[in-house]
Amino acid sequence: MKAAIIVFPGSNRERDAALALERASGTKPVLVWHQDSTLPTVDLVVIPGGFAHGDYLRCGAMAAHSPIMREVKRAAERGLPVIGICNGFQVLTEAGMLPGALLANATLKFHCRDVHLRVETSQSLFTNGYSAGQVIRVPVAHHDGNYFADPATLDRLEQKGLVAFRYVTPEGDVTEEANHNGSARNIAGIFNETKTVLGLMPHPEDATDPLMGCGTDGQGLFAGIAGALGAG
């Protein structure tokens, strides 16, 4: 499995994502600069976390119009898998590749902590390494992680099984207390219509190495991707 990681000015999780992917697949990803206009032949594109362009205008708004994103969008329309993590999720919504938007956290504070997520479906190339209903613990680090969409969009996501992860208690219950950033319906991650594009706010890449002290619950995501795309 060969992956490309898109790097913007202000990205800061590209190395974390690269190490997680290499650990799962045995192959080093390629780093692609945002001003490049050609996407290498790859099996997966990752848009990592960080603060692309300093989060000016809106988080991800400038990055969404980078030359490479035109190619990423075209490739995704042809079925190339794309995952956006944290700032990458914001970029995907700003690029129109996923519905909704990421607003400031309900607390108006930066959140840096572990959270519990419930895997809503195992029926995707991104989540096949988990069981539906499984609860995992991974870190978050964001100020604008409050997922918002209009009621009709939220209903469509629910009806079509396009909610990937929700914020829950350690027991797997959907509660207001577990929803630290105020996201609509506790949504932490969503798919596009074909489940080939995933956006999520938490950082599974930082829960793959036991030496980091954040647990290893993120391994399932990367191992699942590697397995689905012919590696690992």
Image: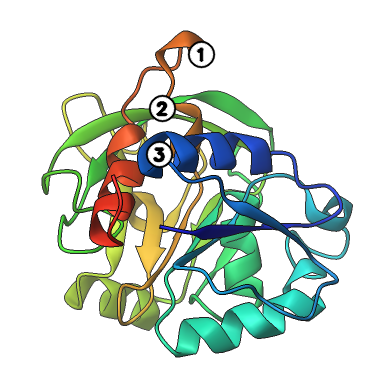
Count residues near mark 2 (Cα–Cα under 10 Å), then give few for <14, some for 14-19, many for 20+.
many
Kindly indicate the quadrant of the structure image that contains residue 78: bottom left
- Decide: is 121 above or below 192: above
Residue 124 appears at what percent x and percent y? Answer: 22, 64
Q: Name the image quarter holding the C terminus.
A: top left
Q: Examine the rendering and report whether any part of residue 103 can be seen.
A: no
Q: Name the residue tied to disc 2.
A: 208
Q: Residue at x 85, y 71 (%)?
A: 35
Using the image, tell me which numbered label, if any, was put on residue 179.
Answer: 3
Q: Nearer the viewer, mark 3 or mark 2?
A: 2
Residue 185 appears at what percent x and percent y? Answer: 33, 56
Task: Identify which amino acid the numbered label 3 is placed on.
Answer: Asn
Residue 9 appears at what percent x and percent y? Answer: 86, 53
**Mark 1 near mark 2, Cβ–Cβ under 8 Å?**
yes
Q: Residue at x 51, y 48 (%)?
A: 201
Cα distance between the residues tagged 3 and 2: 23 Å
Q: Residue at x 24, y 59 (%)?
A: 228
**Mark 3 near mark 1, Cβ–Cβ under 8 Å?**
no
Task: Point out the tag, 3 or 1, that comes first from the N-terminus.
Answer: 3
Q: Secondary structure at mark 3?
A: loop
Q: Residue at x 88, y 59 (%)?
A: 56
Cα distance between the residues tagged 1 and 2: 8 Å
Tally of numbered discs: 3
Using the image, tell me which numbered label, if any, was put on residue 212.
Answer: 1
Task: Identify which amino acid the numbered label 1 is placed on.
Answer: Met
Q: Name the image quarter holding the N terminus.
A: bottom left
Task: Identify which amino acid the numbered label 2 is placed on.
Answer: Thr
Kindly indicate the quadrant of the structure image that contains residue 14: top right
Q: Nearer the viewer, residue 176 or 13?
A: 13
Q: Examine the rendering and report whether any part of residue 64 can be seen.
A: yes
Cα distance between the residues tagged 3 and 1: 25 Å
Q: Is residue 22 left or right of residue 173?
A: right
